[in-house]
Image (cartoon, grey):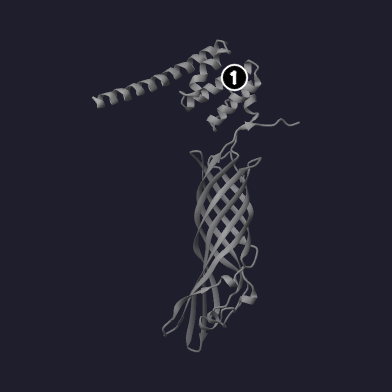
Amino acid sequence: MKRFLLASLLSLLAAKGYGQLTSCAQTLRLAQSTYEQGRLHEVPVLLQNCINSGFNKQEKVAAYKLLTLSYIYLEEPEKANEAMLNLLRTDHYFEINTSTDPAEFVALYKTFRTKPVYRIGGKIGVNATSPNVTESVEANDGKSEYKYKIGIQAHVVAEIPLKNNFDLNVELGLLQRNFSYTNAVTFLDTTFTTDATEKQTWVSLPISIHYQFSRIKFKPFLALGIQGDFLLGAKLDGSRTRQGYQFIEEKSFELKPQRESLNVSAIASAGARFELGGGFVITEVRFSYGLLNVNNSEGAFANSDLAFAYGYADSIYKVNSLSITAGYVYNIFNPKKLNKRK
């Protein structure tokens, strides 16, 4: 008996809900017919209840459009503004049709802010970092060489649309910069080889201006900017081998005391955006050119164990990186009536 009563109650509620949806769909058609007959004063009364509860999103947008048009022709500008604002809040991606929409409706639409106020999201990727040596320092007469290695990076992203297809892009992220060092020196009939990898961890703050080619479907962009970095840590893992002998065991050395805490780089990038959902998928290739040395000559031989046991000396260098990232940014809207320019 209880199951029967419960099933009956659920059926009744479902039928009521379906009836309300059907009724509101009919109400919208009636309001459209009433508007077309010129009985504009009746339109708001017909739509009010279903706007409060009953319309789906598409129907609510159509209802607010009818209200806006009705108030325009009733010469009630404040109510027309309110209806247009509600329309834009309901559907952030609503677009006018200049071929079919009345000129008065188009003109009112253009007095509102309809574009995103900012975008927020994140991206992740990899970078290849290589030192740009400005002063070579050697612990022996051998030959030293730096090579890039791969590091990972992740950023949160905020974009603020500006005018004329320009955006201000601000990021905050964590990145690794890794590179290798090799030194080979020959004494008489034997060769000593030092292999080391330096791993740096930075907090980065890139700020750039993007130019968007909006008329192209996949929306390519170019960007220029500057990046500030703060060093969290730096260490070097090194080993040394002697031809024909057992190698010196690999050892880690803390290099943060010999590194500058702050770094500044110029950045240039190119990428593309692809619309998805309420935002964009972003892919980007970025080059970062170091403007400051990350160390100085005073620390070149600060670690005597590195210099004498491993044949490593700290050359003075800047860091350059090439990164590839992918991510997503979500559009944030805040429609409002624009102030009239005097």
Q: Check the image and report above or below for 335 versus 162.
A: above
- Quick one: label 1, few (<14), some, or many (20+) residues within 10 Å? many
- Residue for point 49% across, 20% down: 49
Name the residue nearer the viewer: 60 or 226. 60
Residue at the farthest right position: 342
**Quadrant location of the C terminus?**
top right
**Residue in front for this viewpoint, 73 or 195:** 73
Measured as percent of width and height from the top left, residue 314 is found at 58, 75
The structure residue drawn at horizontal position 51% and vertical position 13%, both measured from the top left corner, is 33
* Residue 98 can be seen, yes or no: no
Q: Is residue 68 visible?
A: yes
Q: Amino acid at mark 1?
A: Leu
Tell me which corner region of the image, top left, top right, bottom left or bottom right, holds residue 299.
Answer: bottom right
Q: What percent of the width, then of the height, locates residue 84?
A: 59, 26
The residue lying furthest to the front in this view is 2
Q: How many marks?
A: 1
Quarter of the view holding residue 66: top right
> Residue 163 at x, y = what percent?
66, 40
Query: 24 and 298: which one is in front?
Result: 24
Residue wearing tag 1: 69
Indicate the quadrant containing the N terminus: top left, top right, bottom left or bottom right: top left
**Residue 84, above or below 288:** above
Dot 1 falls on a residue whose secondary structure is helix
Q: Residue furthest bottom?
A: 188
Residue 70 x %, y %? 59, 17
Q: Residue at x 59, y 40 (%)?
A: 214
